[in-house]
Image (tube, grey):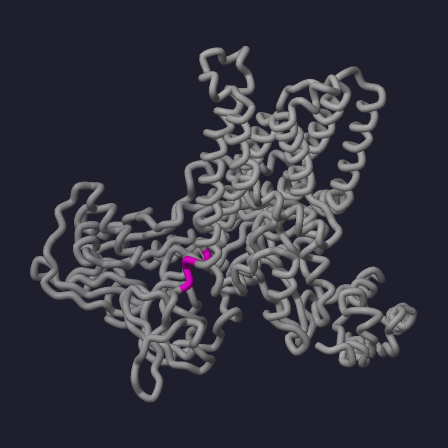
Amino acid sequence: MNDNNKNEPQNLSLPIQGMTCASCVARVEKSLRAVEGIREASVNLATEKANIVYDPSLVDVRMIRKKVEDLGYAVPVEPGGEERITIAIGGMTCAACVNRIEKGLRQIEGVIEARVNLATERATVIYHPGKVGKSEFRKTVEDLGYEVRGFEEEAMADRESEARAREIRLQKRKFLVSAVLSAAVFFGSMPQWFPWWPAVLQKHLSLFLLTTPIQFWAGWQFYRGFWLALKHRTSDMNTLIAVGTSAAYIYSVAITFFPQWFRARGLGLGVYYDTSAMIITLILLGKLLEAMAKGQTSSAIKKLMGLQTKTARVVRNGQERDVPVDEVQRGDTVVIRPGEKIAVDGVVREGSSAVDESMLTGESIPVEKRPGDPVMGGTINKTGSFQFEATKVGKETALAQIIRLVEEAQGSKAPIQRLADRVASVFVPAVISIALVTFAIWMIFGPQPAFTLALLNFVAVLIIACPCALGLATPTAIMVGTGRGAENGILIKGGESLETIHRVNAILFDKTGTLTQGRPSVTDIIVGKEFKEEQILRWAASAEKGSEHPLGEAIVRTAEEKGLALSPVEKFEAIPGQGIRAQIDGEPILLGNLRLMEEKGIGLNGLRREMERLAGEGKTPMVVARNHSAAGIVAVADTLKPHSREAVEALQRMGLEVIMITGDNERTGKAVAAQMGIERVLAEVLPWEKSRQVKNLQEEGKIVAMVG
């Protein structure tokens, strides 16, 4: 963008939430007009928008947005016409790097907000797409001396993983080589401790040859970071490491090659190659552990991304063709076959099947889908085939929204981290100043050899105060904590939640897989007159043998556990959404729901009340009919985990309100909750609606912890 364009007035339409009356409008207008660079500000209460004309050479969108937020009003994260992009960045080492990149990105015209997370090595940028784009972001980051590994979550996932693997391999190689050489330098520098070490390796020249590769090969990354920081008139941890180790190394080199000069001045001839070598080696160990931690922290997001399919089968020009999922457009007809993942969100137009939505809704039992029913990307089709019309693609899909929510939680900054970032920005210059003062004091007031002792203490202050962990400790703790929690079924909303967890007064539990086992099992077998329990179970299991439906698998598994011999099925017919019909031992067997029995005219023989009771308990009852007459009922349900009730009661004794949230219908949800003594149930809640439910509870004055 040229200078003339930068000086031209820009128009901005800024959404504002929280205004309630004309006084609010006047307050916002007055405050905005007082900002230097804003030529005009007009606020509309009905549309909740501020129309602003501003001079971009004097003020930017981020400053305007902050002014509104400082007044106590909310500006949506992505105001109209703005977009969000995620950038994978390599080469960051500390909080000073974070501050430098954030500052550089925020100075780009058209950028509204930029947040950088050291632990995830990502920058999230909110910007006006008409004013700035990827090329400007790449140039800015690379000009600052860092590597841009890719843009967008989906496109860069594989490249980012490969880059992390390369980083781990490089750090491991550097550390191992440095460790071997450092050990040799350490042994050679301490002959009084290791008299058995070869004399030739104790000579100063040998120590110089062993240390130099560590200093300038393994430690080159610190010199590079130091130079880049120096170019931008800043400082970071690389500055401390480079200055500290170089001081010890250069002093030792001078003694090695010019011993007479030091001897003539009465200075000691001790070298400190081991100091430089060991410092670099230990910091490289830290860098290796850091690289490994970064590679593991985003496992929760990787698992969610693993739900996404790479391709989709669409109908175009009357022919089916496989295309990358990114090329699926709204309105495309997508074909789904048995066992395939659904690529995007849509509405079924033709065919029917059962779809496993447990990975998104938590519902363990597949949901029947017919024309007009919605389907979600990332879910798995079971046995049927169907076609659906794509209605939401790319970042609009339910799965993409869930991934974004998790990323925002893991990438969030805790309040204490913001403090650490502010401290880090002034910490390094302060440390260098203290180190120089230390050097001067030892030179002036210290005992002989004053220069040697002053140098050692100068290096000690620089290295001991190195803030390697200052910018990384909190975000890594958040990432590892939330990641480990996710592996155990606990989703923590973000860094701020970790700091406020001790004030929690309400626990929100997801049902499926958290309080329950996550897979259905047989809970009840009701037998009619003249029949035995084993007969009912054997007929049902024989009919369901080979079924991929979780209900059928549960029945077959129970029969096998009881050691029942299953009969061969002579004829078999699946009735979508209702049940199955089979011929076993020459007799017709019907297994299914109440609607199937009514359609086939099967008498229930007094079992209707039992069906209603079981359904009221949140179970799925299926009638087993033989020779056109009901013989019994098999009920299947997702059973509670052994310690669920105990955990709920323990939380209630602590004075916490326990609430259950589920994608199930209200009747099933309340039946399950009653078994654990949970009084409040939020039922029929879809994944992307759960955050809204949490906000509703917060508006009631509750501090909420979400488990599930």
Tell me if 374 is positioned left or right of 132 in this view: left
**335 and 543: which is toward the camera:** 335
Identified at 46% across, 56% down, the residue is 304
Q: Quadrant of residue 347?
A: bottom left
> Magenta span: helix, strand or loop, mainly?
helix
Tell me if 78 is positioned left or right of 574 in this view: right
**646 and 415: which is toward the camera:** 415
**699 and 591: which is toward the camera:** 699
The answer to whether any part of residue 436 appears in the image is: yes
Vertical placement of residue 462 versus 33, above or below: above
Q: Quadrant of the N terminus?
A: bottom right
Identified at 71% across, 50% down, the residue is 230
Vertical placement of residue 564 versus 135, above or below: above
**560 and 171: which is toward the camera:** 171
Q: Which residues are magenta?
A: 304-308
Where residue 311 sits: x, y (%)? 37, 70
Q: Is 639 in the magenta?
A: no
Residue sitting at the far left: 586
Identified at 9% across, 63% down, the residue is 570
Where residue 238 sits: x, y (%)? 65, 42
Where residue 47 sits: x, y (%)? 76, 78
The answer to whether any part of residue 649 appears in the image is: no
Q: Is 305 in the magenta?
A: yes
Count all numbered tags in the image, as a single digit.
0
Tell me if 43 is positioned left or right of 503 in this view: right
Residue sitting at the far bottom: 317
Where residue 348 sits: x, y (%)? 39, 76
